[in-house]
Amino acid sequence: MKPSILFFVLLFNWIFFSCSEKASSIQIEISNELSLDRTFETVELSKQFLGIETLNGFGIQDISSNAFLTSQLVDNDNDGNMDILLFQPEIKPNSKATYQIVKLPEDFKASEEKVCYSRFVPERTDDYAWENNKVAFRTYGPNAQYRFENRLEEGTLSSGIDAWLKRVDYSIIDAWYKKYTEKTGTYHEDTGEGLDNFHVGSSRGVGGIAYKKDSTYYISKNFVSHKTLTNGPIRTSFVLDYGVWDANGTLIKETKTISLDYGNNLSKFEIAIKGVDTISAGLTLHEKDGVVTSHKDETWLNYWQPHADSELGTAIVTIPLYFIDSEKYETDVKDLSNAFVNLRVVNGKVKYYSGFTWQKSNQFKNQYEWEQYLSSFTKKLNNPLKIEIVKQ
């Protein structure tokens, strides 16, 4: 072997093993500066932040216990190299915890259970449905709109967000739709897993958006296209494009990126908006027999209502950057009574969280417990965990 070739081979090996050693020795310290336990918060570690070229094959190890934690890798640009590592630390109030980025053993078996899961559902017209271990949702696509507008069966005209009231911690989407397609049952009846008895119609459901012009709220029709981004043990995410819609002469372009993380009752909505500088996210008031609670200082809105033989809380949470105010909008027109959070569009985007709790799921006993959850969620949102590389 010629000296020049030998030099480059040795150089390559040195760089490769140096990078591998560097990656295997990265330690991060996560700080919780609140007097609250931090659980079910997803930490995102990018390869840029960690200073490595790819996260392929890497995971998280708890230094105090040497245990490998549940994690999820995300390839943002579909180039085969993982760009982000997701995991959920558990950190006591006013304390810190240290974790290590490690190459997982070859015999390490990650869970393949569908926990945070979403998919397009062509067998039920063209729903898009998503869920985690706490809650489930769906919304409606262009074929459902076409069928509605042409008076065909199974048509739905709505950009509202439907709540599926599950009370089990495993995936139900495929099983419930299978009941529908095989005519072996219906997800509108509770056989122990929960049911869909939440009416959406043209309402905003749980977090659908509207544009307020003068004193009227205008809404889009169904989404026009979809793209699934991630499914896994930590997060599911996807994109819904609503194209350009007309709010009484004001043209609005809307694209939603929605994600739902493990252990959370609230989906995250990141909406790209063009054409307006404000937008509103709403909660249907149904029979208008519930209680609207708004906390401006904590920037959350809740609607607690009787629901069949139980009770239901639906909520929207945002941060002060986007929050303008909230409003209870009531009308005699069917489905158009909603509680709204009015939001500021910042650099073409709006971000908020929306979701629900069903009392029969036994996740929260009453309105007070649910609103304590919303309060804590908001505090954590406004005081994110601090992440620092301590060894590399």
Image (cartoon, rainbow, N blue to C red):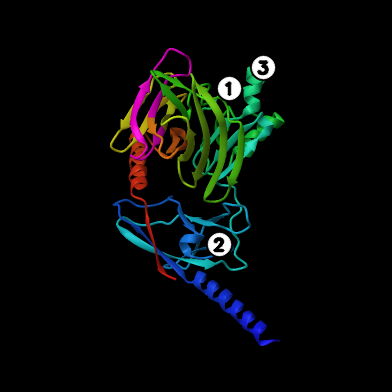
Q: What residue type is labelled 1?
A: Leu
Instruction: Find numbered disc 2 in the image and state the secondary structure of the residue it sits on.
Output: loop
Whichever of labels 2 and 1 marks the residue nearer the N terminus, that label is 2
The foreground one among 97 and 244 is 244
Label 3 to label 1: alpha-carbon separation: 11 Å
Which residue is at a point 63% across and 18% down the rendered structure image? 149
> Residue 71: which disc?
none
Residue 356 in the image, given as x and y percentages of width and height: 44, 34
Residue position for label 2: 55
Residue 114 falls inside the magenta stretch = no
In magenta, the rendered stretch is: 315-341
Instruction: Find numbered disc 3 in the image and state the secondary structure of the residue it sits on.
Output: loop
Say which quarter of the image contains residue 65: bottom left
Q: In this view, does 381 lie to the left or right of 82?
A: left
Q: In this view, does 168 lie to the left or right of 143?
A: left
Residue 325 in the image, given as x and y percentages of width and height: 33, 30
Instruction: Find numbered disc 1 in the image and state the secondary structure of the residue it sits on.
Output: loop
Residue position for label 3: 150
Do we see residue 164 in this rendering?
no
Residue position for label 1: 157
Q: Residues within 10 Å of mark 2 (few under 14, many from 20)?
A: many
